[in-house]
Image: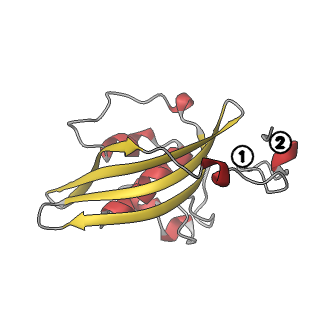
Amino acid sequence: MMTAADTCPCGSGKSFSACCQHLLDGSLSPGSATELMRSRYTAYVVRDVAYILRTWHPSTRPTRIDPHTIPTWNGLVIIGAETDDEKGRATVEFKARAMTSGRMLLLHEKSRFVREKGQWFYVDGDVRESADQAADKPGRNSPCPCSSGRKFKKCCGP
């Protein structure tokens, strides 16, 4: 469970209370597709399925998400974003790391967003092949991305 003073998982460097908490609790709305992307990532980290579904466009939204199937996300990097304000559309390219079943997962996606009546929604995304996936893998002596506090080689590494 996140506390207000914890560093927000979205990678902004801000506290949870100064970043994504007010988006997840509904007291604020994301002002951009990038802000929505970051808050959705945080929602996946804390398994806030209600927020994930609420910010997913109805045309592509699943009927339900089992929170037990959500991997343990532990790193987000926004690569770039493009917004067409006139059309109310945007894309955000990102890489995110997770641990699932003891294995590291790297998701590299270019997500599409749409703004309707002032509200941003996630529509869908294209998963991209990452030419540098080997470079994205932590070094043997790096901290393990599963947040155990141990070195990668002594934890989830090969």
| 21 relative position to 155: left or right | left
Q: Which mark is residue 89?
A: none
Which residue position holds label 2? 155
Q: How many marks?
A: 2
The quarter of the image holding the C terminus is: top right
Label 2 sits on a secondary structure element that is loop
CB within 8 Å, label 1 to label 2: yes
Instruction: Determine the CA span between mark 1 and mark 2.
Output: 8 Å
Q: Measured from the top left, where is residue 28 in percent x and y?
A: 33, 64
Q: How is the image coloured?
A: secondary structure
Q: Could you tell which of marks 1 and 2 lies nearer the N-terminus? A: 1
Kind of residue at badge 1: Cys
Q: Measured from the top left, where is residue 138 in percent x and y?
A: 73, 53
At horizontal 71% and vertical 46% (from top left) the residue drawn is 146
Which residue position holds label 1? 146
Label 1 sits on a secondary structure element that is loop
Mark 2 surroundings within 10 Å by alpha-carbon count, few (fewer than 14), some (14 through 19), many (20 or more) = some
Kind of residue at badge 2: Cys
Q: Measured from the top left, where is residue 56 in percent x and y?
A: 30, 43
Above or below, 75 against 103 in this view is below
